[in-house]
């Protein structure tokens, strides 16, 4: 029997670059799933949100973390993958892992990084 969900996961799996549902290691060492892609940056999913599967791939509904948007150009794809849960329909998929390799902003607002 043909499974539309498998087709949707296959389509999502062939999308290039970071996708909603993938993992991102932040500069502070945190590991979070990508909750939104807006223009040329990503936003991180909050822990209380849910991921679902649709015809365009994985969708996220919930609050985004209070964390600055991360430019896609600063993300480096890591060689490993990591499982991620999709809540509707209930299944686990292999997700890409990205690392934010951008420059860490100064805590004091100095963009040069000097203290």
Image (cartoon, helix red, strand yellow):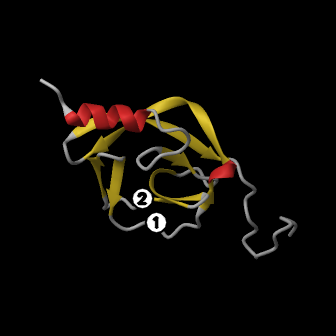
Q: Which residue is found at the position 39% from the left and 62% from the top? A: 46
Q: CA distance from mark 1 to mark 2?
A: 6 Å
Tell whether label 2 touches label 1 (CB within 8 Å). Answer: yes
Task: Give the percent coordinates (x, y) of residue 65.
Answer: 46, 66
Q: Report if residue 76 is visible in the image.
A: yes
Task: Give the percent coordinates (x, y) of residue 85.
Answer: 30, 42
Residue furthest to the bottom: 108
Residue count near mark 2 (Cα–Cα under 10 Å), binned few <14, some 14–19, many ≥20? many
Residue 45 disc label: 2
Residue furthest to the top: 1
Task: Give the percent coordinates (x, y) of residue 115.
Answer: 86, 70
Say which quadrant the N terminus sits in. top left
Q: Which residue is found at the position 64% from the left and 53% from the top? A: 27
Q: Which residue is found at the position 20% from the left and 48% from the top? A: 88
| Secondary structure of residue under mark 1 | loop
- Total label count? 2
Q: Report if residue 94 is visible in the image.
A: no
Task: Give the percent coordinates (x, y) of residue 15.
Answer: 48, 38
Q: Is residue 13 left or right of residue 6?
A: right
Residue 65 disc label: 1
Residue 114 disc label: none
Q: Is residue 74 left or right of residue 98?
A: right
| Secondary structure of residue under mark 2 | loop
The quadrant in which residue 68 appears is: bottom right
Q: Which residue is found at the position 23% from the left and 36% from the top? A: 5
Tell me if residue 61 comes above or below residue 18 in the rendering: below
Q: Earlier in the sequence, mark 1 or mark 2?
A: 2
Q: Is residue 24 left or right of residue 56?
A: right
In depth, the one of 113 and 16 nearer the eye is: 16
The quadrant in which residue 91 appears is: top left
């Amino acid at each position: 029997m043909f499974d539309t969900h498998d087709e949707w996961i296959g389509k999502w799996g062939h999308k290039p670059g970071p996708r909603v549902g993938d993992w991102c290691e932040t500069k502070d060492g945190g590991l979070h799933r990508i909750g939104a892609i807006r223009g040329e940056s990503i936003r991180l999913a909050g822990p209380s949100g849910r991921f679902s599967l649709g015809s365009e791939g994985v969708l996220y509904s919930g609050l985004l973390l209070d964390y600055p948007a991360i430019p896609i150009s600063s993300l480096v794809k890591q060689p490993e993958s990591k499982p991620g849960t999709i809540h509707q329909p209930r299944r686990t998929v292999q997700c890409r892992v990205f690392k934010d390799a951008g420059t860490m902003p100064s805590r004091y607002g100095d963009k040069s990084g000097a203290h």
